[in-house]
Amino acid sequence: MTKIFVQVLCFFSLATSSYAKREIIKISDLNITTNKENGTTLGKISASELNVDFGGNEFQAEDNGKLLKGSVEIKDQQFSAKVSFVTYKTSLALDNPLITLDHLFLKDALINFDKEEMFFDVPYIKTGNEDTTVSSKNLKGSCDPKGDTSTDIDIVCLKNGVLESEQAQLINQSMNILTNNTTALISPETIAIDASKIIFTSNGGKTQVEKLKADCTNGVKTRFDINDFIEGCLQQAHIFLDEFSEFNEVPKINLNNKGLVDLEDIKFVKVDIRNKYFDIRSRIKIFFHLNLKVNGQVVHDEEKHILKISVAKATIAGVPAKTMTLMILKLFLEEDSIKIEGDTIYIAL
């Protein structure tokens, strides 16, 4: 879920130079639409009000309530925006996410930076590249610069921030994840997420998880990097999911015609990770409710973009049951991005 929030924040670094001293920057009703063609990003930009104050030198732009309209271009790490007779240009760092974006749509955003706080309110945003699309409805955030002179809001918020979204969605070739009422609390030590009604769509089926709570060690160094984030979570993480349901008919395991296991019979899943070793606790119904325990090791293959989860031990009601556990996991987990071979689960990132 953190990846979702970070990607929808990426565009805010266009507001001003990364090396300018932050005083006050306020943009009202900001709208941006861009698309990339032949390596160059072109788009339209508009806003009803722009206020910038650097050290008492104040700049304001408005047109009696009418939208100020202009154009945006990103080419060869150079960002430029032109509104009326004003042109703004700046160089983008190689790791700036704006360089990799293929499209961006932003509607009626409010952005406010000052020396003590960054905050923003975005009714709707959709962005991504050819592989992944991220969108959010009613995205809000408040972040503490802590004296950081960077105006890149993604860098600041990944150290000290509170982000909220009424709805957020990530779609790529292997997964489609929709979250509701999501809150992310970020500190230099921890990234914590709380969400409800998370819907996973894959292979034509939809699985809903009513509650998700998770926290990981904050391993992000500067900008968001999926490898940094994963390494932080493998250092230490706590994940809790509760109340599973399926939107359509799901396959079931027939246990000698004496009982059935389906998704609704999994009451909760709790995952604890420390130094790449995991411990999973759950409660499932076979004949009646029983405790499930699984432990093992997680390895992150950065080059192949894969998580390799090796199951060392599994018990049901205290009785060794690795074969049955892997059979249950294979039934409910195996899809385009998740494969189970022997005692190992492979998750494509």
Image: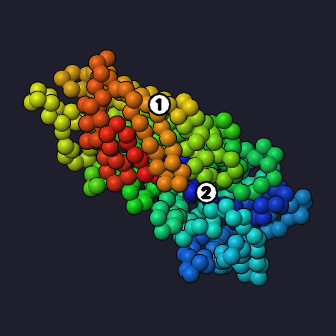
How was the colour assigned to the protein in this rendering? rainbow
Can the viewer see residue 2 in this picture?
Answer: yes
Residue 280 placement (x, y as % from top left): 41, 29
Label 2, on which residue?
Answer: 9
Tag count: 2
In the drawing, does residue 332 fall left or right of residue 232? left
Residue at the disc numbered 1: 278
Above/below status of 251 relative to 177: above
- The kind of residue tagged 2 is Leu
Q: Residue at x 51, y 67 (%)?
A: 129
Tell me how far mark 2 sits from mark 1, CA to CA: 31 Å
SS state under label 1: strand
Nearer mark to the viewer, of 2 and 1: 1
Q: Residue at x 78, y 43 (%)?
A: 146
Q: Vertical placement of 19 versus 185: above or below?
A: below
Residue nearest the viewer, comparing 57 with 168: 168
The reply to whether discs 2 and 1 touch (Cβ–Cβ < 8 Å) is no
Q: Residue at x 69, y 54 (%)?
A: 153
The amino acid sitting under disc 1 is Phe
Q: Nearer the viewer, residue 9 or 220?
A: 220
Looking at the image, is mark 2 or mark 1 earlier in the sequence? 2
Q: Position of residue 305 (x, y in %)?
A: 49, 53
- Outermost left residue: 257
SS type, badge 2: helix
Is disc 2 surrounded by few (<14), some (14 to 19) or many (20+) residues within 10 Å? many
Percent of width and height locating residue 294: 38, 28
Whether residue 218 sits left or right of residue 4 in the image: it is right
Q: Nearer the viewer, residue 321 or 268?
A: 321
Crowd around label 1: few <14 · some 14–19 · many ≥20 (10 Å)? many
Q: Quarter-wise, where is residue 24 in the image?
A: bottom right
